[in-house]
Image (cartoon, rainbow, N blue to C red):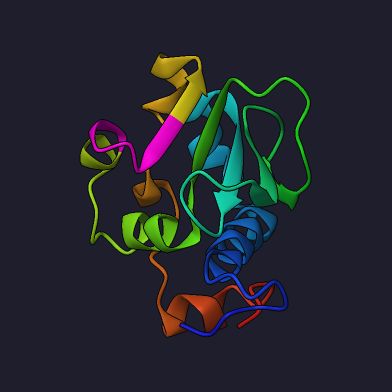
Amino acid sequence: MPANKSGLQSESIFNLMSAFLQAGHGPSIIPKVKATFAFNILKKKGGKPVMVWDIDLKNGNGHVIQQTPKNPDAVFSMTDADFVKLCDGKMNGSTAFMQGKMKIKGNMAAATKFTPELFPSNTPENMAKYGGAKL
């Protein structure tokens, strides 16, 4: 998967999520999740976030925006590579958490509602389908 201007592979995935919601698919997700999230993406474990994403799956049609959210229900922190593995189905969320590859702060019940299955898989076909996703 090509990297974006940030040099992070996860940026393509967040752009796909954003385009999916902008295409009008948020109303099917919002009632299931009813929470907001922050994703701190790190270049290396223990490092400082190089990108922060605000994912609102509580209000309106929802959104995925690169910004620091105000008062998210849960905050996830993980490396770019581990986030990609999680979204590609190569890493289990529970395992990632137990192994310290994914740190979560805040409302754990809300955190468990966020799963990669909420969004289309990270494939070239889905990237093309949701045109707002930049490769």
Which residue occupies the foreground of this view, 59 or 11? 11
Q: Nearer the viewer, residue 73 or 25?
A: 73
Q: Where is residue 26 shown, x and y percent of the image?
A: 59, 44
Find residue 18 and report its horizontal and vertical position in percent: 65, 57
Residue at point 67%, 40% (across, down): 62
User: Residue 32, can we see it?
Assistant: no
Q: Position of residue 87 (x, y in %)?
A: 37, 58
Of the 4 image quadrants, the one containing the N terminus is bottom left
- The residue located at (21%, 39%) in the rendering is 95
- The answer to whether residue 116 shows anywhere in this view is yes
Residue 73's place in the image compared with 40, above or below, is: above
Residue 13 counted in the magenta span:
no
Residue 119 vertical position relative to residue 15 in the rendered view, above or below: above
Asked if residue 79 lies left or right of residue 20, the reply is left
Q: Quadrant of the C terminus?
A: bottom right
The residue drawn where x is 42% and y is 63% is 81
Magenta range is 97-103
Number of marks: 0
Q: Residue visible at 41% across and 47% down?
A: 118
